[in-house]
Amino acid sequence: MQLSLQNFTTLVQQAAAAVQASAAQLLDFSLGSVLRAILEANASIALWLQWLILLVLQTTRLASSSGLDADSFGADFGFARLAALAATGSVTFSRYTATMAAFVPAGATVTTADNASQFTVATDDGNSAWSASQSGYVIGAGVASVTLPVTAVVAGAAGNVLSGSITLIASAMPGIDTVSNADALTGGLDAETDNAFRQRFQSFIDSRTRATIQAVTYAAYSVQQGISCTVQENSDGSGNYLPGHFVVTVDDGSGNPPPSLLSAVQIAVDAVRPIGSSFAIQAPNRIAADISLTLTLANGADSALVIATVNAAIASYVNALGVGMALPYTRIAQLAYDASPSVQNVNGLTLQGGSADLPASASAVIKLGTLAIS
C-alpha cells in the first residue's frame, strides 16, 4: 500500500469538508473561530504522525535507507556491505652512500609530501632482499636502491596517489636517504556505496534458490569490490566439453588476480555450487590491446596536453573491461573525440594492427598493451 502524503492546508480542508457534511446547518470555519482552531490543531498532529511514519519507512526500507540504516536492514538477511580496499604499489628506497648495508623493516611507514596518505612496507618473500629472520629487507653494501611493495594504511580511494607523490620516510631507517614512487599506487576503493549495496541486495535475493549461474556469480562478486567473472558450464579450463563441471574465470581489474583472491572465490562458490558437480576457479587469459592513432587538433591546441588526456581516457576504458568483454574498434575513436573538444579528427586508427573489434572469450580479459598517439 502506498502512503498518500498530505500537506497542512489539505488536511484542514478535508477535515472541514467531513465535519460540514455531517452537520445539519452551516458551520463557521472563519479565521479565529473555535471550530477552525480545533481542526488546525488536529491537522498539526496528523502532520507529526505522517512524519513519524516516513521516518520509520526511511530507516526500515532498503530503497530509502542509507548508511548504518541500510547496513542494519541487510544484517537481518546476513547481508553485509563490501569493505574498502587499500591501494597497493611499490616505492624505491635510495641512499647517497652505499658503502655499508642498510635495513628496511616490514611495516615501515612512508608518506606523501603533505602527509595526507600513509603507506607501510609489505612483506614480499620473493624479493631477493627479503630476510625472514629479520622481518625486513637488507640492502647490501654497494647497492644504491631497492624497490619494495607498499600498502596504504587507510583503505579507500584516497590511497590512489600519482607517481612521485610519496617522498617522506616516517620510520627510522639508518642509511636510507630518500623514497619515491615511480608509478602511481592503484587498487584503492572506498567501502561499497549505498546504491551498489542496494543493487547487490537484489542479486542476493534473486540468488537464494542457489545452484544457479546467478548464485555462483553473486558468490564471486561478494568476495570483494571490483570483481568481474564469467561461468562456463559443462566445460573444463581449456574450453573442452566436460559434463557436470563448470569453470569460473575471475579478475579483480588487474588482469592477474592474486592466488589469495582465487582461493576466496573458491570457498564462496563451493558454498552455492550444485551438489554432485565439480568446478574450477581460474585467472583470465590476458589479451594485450595494441592501439595506434593519429589526432588532428584545433589550431592553438596544446598537443601534449590533449594527447595525455586522450591517452588517459583510452587507458581507463580498456583497463576497466571485464572478463569476456570485447573491445569495439570504433569505441576508441569515440573516446578520443569525447576526451577533448580540441580533437577534430582521428586518423590511422589501428587495433592489433587492423580495423576490427578485438574479441575476448569467456576466459579472457583485455587490458591495454601499447598505445601510440601522435
Image (cartoon, rainbow, N blue to C red):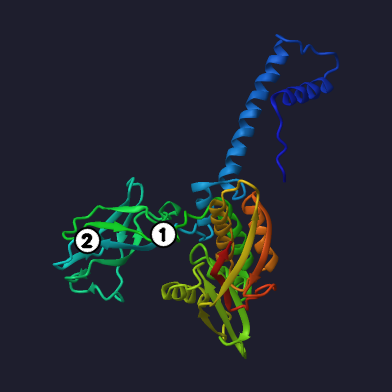
Query: Is residue 66 shown to the viewer in this render?
Result: yes
Question: In the orientation shown, which residue stands out farthest toward the front?
Answer: 299
Q: Which one is in front, 211 or 196?
A: 196
Q: In this rendering, is residue 238 above or below 363? A: below
Identify which residue, 279 or 94, lies in the foreground: 94
As drawn, the label of residue 115 is none
Residue drawn at 62 percent across, 32 percent down? 49
Could you say whether the residue bearing mark 2 is in a helix, strand or loop?
loop
Of residues 361 and 210, the one nearer the viewer is 361
- Where does residue 44 sit, x and y in percent of width and height? 64, 24
Say which mark, if any, is on residue 95: 2
Q: Residue at x 36, y 50 (%)?
A: 117
Q: Is residue 280 left or right of residue 14?
A: left
Element assignment for label 1? loop
Identify which residue, 253 or 95, lies in the foreground.
95
Q: Based on the displayed image, in which of its 4 quarters is residue 176 positioned?
A: bottom left
Closer to the N terminus: mark 1 or mark 2?
2
Q: Residue furthest left?
A: 100
Q: Which quadrant would the C terminus be assigned to in this image?
A: bottom right
Residue contact at pointers 1 and 2, CB within 8 angstroms: no
Residue 184 image offset from top left, x and y in percent = 42, 59
Amino acid at the residue labelled 1: Leu
One can see residue 216 in this view: no
The alpha-carbon separation of the residues under discs 1 and 2 comes to 22 Å
Q: Tag 1: Cα neighbours inside 10 Å, few (<14), some, or many (≥20)? A: many
Please identify, in this view, whether the residue under mark 1 or under mark 2 is nearer the observer.
2
Question: 10 Å neighbourhood of mark 2: few (<14), some, or many (≥20)?
Answer: some
Q: Is residue 210 above or below residue 180?
A: below
**Whole-percent x and y of residue 76?**
52, 56
